[in-house]
Image: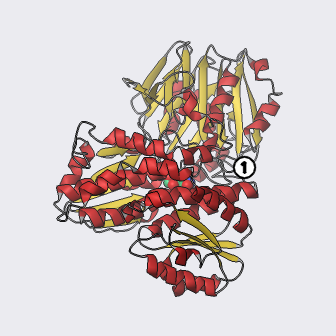
């Protein structure tokens, strides 16, 4: 998604902007640009492709622009118009320069009107039109702040903008009207604005998450928050963030994704610590969480999410059904919002989104709230829209995830879902056999087991298998039970970072069509741990093996019968054996993440920023 940075203060603005845009690169982009004041004129440098191309236009010497102390910057992820330099932001209309994140839905009408009034948009974007509107309002005599407010009256759709004008050189005006925008006072004087908090953390931990309809009006001396609708000044408290800048660096790993795969044990521990009552000796002590209290009276749960979060929801369904004996549905947010779902009395809708900004998931939460249905969220980002709009929220504490592919946020989401399943199972008296307390004892050991697992022979075997299978023309990932959604997630990882066609399938479904695809060029990753489904999965393995596929099997280290059927073999260590089968997704998922990573680096793809993808999908 597009990323925005704005700055006014005493620091060299171009440096602040470029560093800020680097922090936003993880969101995915295809062109970039900066605009900065030189005396009272605005200069723009923008280019197709990576940020380096913009730095080159700055002659590689950001210091050469040290006298500029006010500017705006942007990374663009194309929605309207190709990813060209012409379409890159910032856009200039006369003395007005803007950057924009989001979509202007009525852009075609606006464009006609602007052209009818003699305007000549230079780009194919919807964004540029906003600059025309501001320019026209200023030409009618309004100041910049009022012109921005007036322009929003003509615009439909969710977006954020940051605007400069040569007529008011000491001012940066930012608006959140949908897509997120955050602001912070620079301790050295001045203000920095951005699409998320990461560019701000180098300078301060005190961040204001602008609310829908907030305008940030920043001069070098002050930051005011003003209502877009009324123009009146608003009080907004800064939140203190605990993400240190060091956490944002790679710490010796070649890619963020690999670092984040290895951070999973810590992310699980931090998530447990963040949610459980530490003083309690009871299993699954979640009762103090406002969200848990809201779930107490739930009679059915609807899990709604996109992408990897949807896969986490699928695992969550198995757990909630097994442990809490409560009806659960799982839906893609983009489908649910346009269906006519039937929700019963006591329904709770739980939106899952690591970013907390995914447009479709947020839309479902808003729709349900409007219908009076209780909503919950699971998110990794404090202050995100989901965290503020759901009735209550459970935070994962995975820390910042920079790689576009979800890794540690996924396993942290799994953890929250299992905590909810165990908590609700006890609450609802759904555990006559007393299996939930021992499950909790095992669960708290999972981070340690995972840390060992990540350094074990199993990972070395996964690396070898990746090297051997990297040239396969396509992959199936198959499993049953808990391993089925893990297989879906494994296939998604391979597609998104290695650009190889991969399908995740319930092993029992293969013979209903996809088995026709199997031949010698195909690889099949078979998840067959020693669980209640193992024998059935092995039968499905035999079916694909008989048709020539190369098999990578994952199973118990002492499952020699299974190992002998596989071309490549990843043994799950003996230490895993005592675990309840429902905990295996915490180990199998990181294994598949690493497998995809190893294939991707062999293919030389941009692992942390795969093509066409964005970290935070704020458009539907
Ligand atoms: O921020 P969210 O969890 O709502 O994001 C949902 C998907 O966009 C996300 O999981 C996406 O599928 C990832 N790239 C997967 O690695």
Secondary-structure class at tag 1: loop
Task: Find out if the beta carbon at label 1 lies less than 8 Å from the nearest ligand 1 atom.
Answer: no
Looking at the image, which residue is at 50% across and 78% down? 507
Residue 103: x and y in percent read 55, 48
Residue 511: x and y in percent read 53, 86
Q: Is residue 110 visible?
A: yes
Looking at the image, which residue is at 66% across and 80% down? 549
Residue 111: x and y in percent read 63, 48
Q: How many marks?
A: 1
- Dividing the picture into quarters, in which one does residue 251 lie? top right
Residue 66: x and y in percent read 73, 16
Q: Is residue 8 above or below residue 436?
A: above
Q: Which residue is mark 1?
A: 83
User: Please, which colouring scheme is shown?
Assistant: secondary structure
The crowding category of the residue bearing disc 1, from other C-alpha atoms within 10 Å (few below 14, some 14 to 19, many at least 20), is some
Q: Is residue 254 left or right of residue 27?
A: right
Q: Is residue 238 above or below residue 381?
A: above
Q: Is residue 355 visible?
A: no
Looking at the image, which residue is at 52% across and 28% down? 244
Q: Is residue 524 left or right of residue 197?
A: right
Name the one closer to the observer, 557 or 34: 557
Q: Is residue 16 above or below residue 583?
A: above
Name the one closer to the observer, 78 or 401: 401
Q: Is residue 488 above or below residue 142?
A: below
- Dividing the picture into quarters, in which one does residue 92 lie? top right
């Amino acid at each position: 998604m597009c990323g925005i940075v704005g700055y006014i203060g005493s620091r060299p603005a171009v440096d602040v902007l470029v560093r800020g845009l680097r922090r936003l690169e993880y969101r995915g982009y295809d062109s970039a640009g900066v605009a900065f004041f030189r005396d009272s004129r605005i200069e723009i440098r923008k280019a197709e492709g990576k940020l380096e191309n913009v730095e080159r236009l700055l002659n590689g010497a950001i210091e050469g622009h040290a006298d500029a102390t006010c500017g705006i910057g942007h990374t663009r992820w194309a929605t309207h118009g190709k990813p060209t330099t012409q379409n890159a932001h910032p856009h200039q209309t006369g003395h007005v320069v803007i950057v924009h994140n989001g979509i202007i839905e009525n852009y075609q009408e606006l464009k006609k009107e602007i052209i009818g009034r003699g305007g000549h948009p230079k780009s194919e974007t919807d964004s540029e039109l906003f600059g025309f509107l501001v320019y026209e309002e200023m030409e009618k005599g309004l100041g910049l702040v009022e012109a921005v407010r007036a322009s929003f009256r003509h615009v439909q759709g969710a977006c954020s903008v940051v605007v400069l004008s040569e007529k008011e050189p000491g001012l940066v005006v930012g608006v959140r009207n949908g897509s997120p925008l955050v602001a912070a006072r620079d301790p050295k004087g001045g203000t920095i604005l951005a699409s998320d908090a990461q560019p701000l953390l180098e300078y301060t931990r005190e961040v204001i998450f602008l609310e829908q309809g907030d305008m940030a009006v920043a001069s070098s001396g002050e930051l005011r928050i003003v209502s877009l609708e009324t123009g009146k000044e608003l009080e907004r408290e800064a939140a203190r963030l605990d993400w240190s800048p060091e956490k944002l660096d790679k710490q010796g790993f070649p890619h963020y994704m690999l670092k984040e795969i290895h951070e999973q044990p810590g992310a699980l521990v931090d998530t447990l610590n963040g949610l459980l009552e530490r003083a309690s000796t009871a299993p699954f002590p979640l009762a103090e969480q406002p969200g848990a209290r809201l779930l107490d009276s739930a009679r059915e749960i609807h899990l709604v999410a996109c992408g990897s979060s949807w896969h986490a929801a699928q695992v969550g369904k198995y757990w909630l059904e097994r442990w809490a004996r409560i009806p659960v549905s799982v839906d893609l947010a983009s489908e649910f919002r346009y269906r006519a779902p039937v929700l019963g009395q006591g329904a709770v809708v739980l939106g899952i989104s690591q970013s907390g900004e995914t447009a479709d998931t947020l839309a479902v939460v808003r729709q349900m709230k409007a219908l009076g249905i209780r909503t919950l969220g699971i998110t990794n980002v404090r202050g995100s829209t989901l965290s503020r709009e759901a009735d209550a929220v459970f935070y994962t504490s995975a820390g910042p995830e920079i790689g576009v592919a979800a890794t540690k946020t996924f396993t942290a989401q799994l953890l929250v879902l299992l905590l909810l399943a165990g908590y609700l199972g006890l609450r609802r008296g759904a555990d006559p056999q007393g299996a939930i307390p021992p499950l909790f004892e095992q669960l708290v050991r999972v981070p340690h087991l995972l840390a060992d697992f990540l350094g074990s022979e199993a990972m070395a075997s996964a690396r070898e298998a990746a090297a051997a299978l990297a040239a396969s023309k396509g992959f199936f990932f198959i499993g049953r039970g808990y391993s089925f959604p893990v297989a879906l997630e494994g296939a998604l990882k391979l597609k998104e970072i290695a650009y190889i066609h991969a399908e995740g399938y319930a092993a029992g479904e293969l013979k209903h069509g996809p088995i026709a695809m199997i031949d010698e060029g195909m690889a099949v990753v078979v998840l067959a741990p020693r669980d209640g489904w193992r024998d059935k999965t092995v039968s499905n393995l035999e079916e694909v093996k008989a048709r020539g596929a190369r098999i990578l099997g994952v199973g118990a280290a002492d499952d020699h019968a299974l190992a002998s059927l596989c071309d490549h073999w990843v043994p799950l260590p003996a230490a895993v054996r005592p675990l309840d089968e429902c905990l295996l997704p915490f180990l199998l998922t990181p294994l598949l993440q690493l497998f995809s990573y190893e294939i991707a680096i062999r293919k030389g793809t941009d692992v942390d920023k795969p093509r066409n993808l964005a970290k935070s999908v704020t458009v539907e």
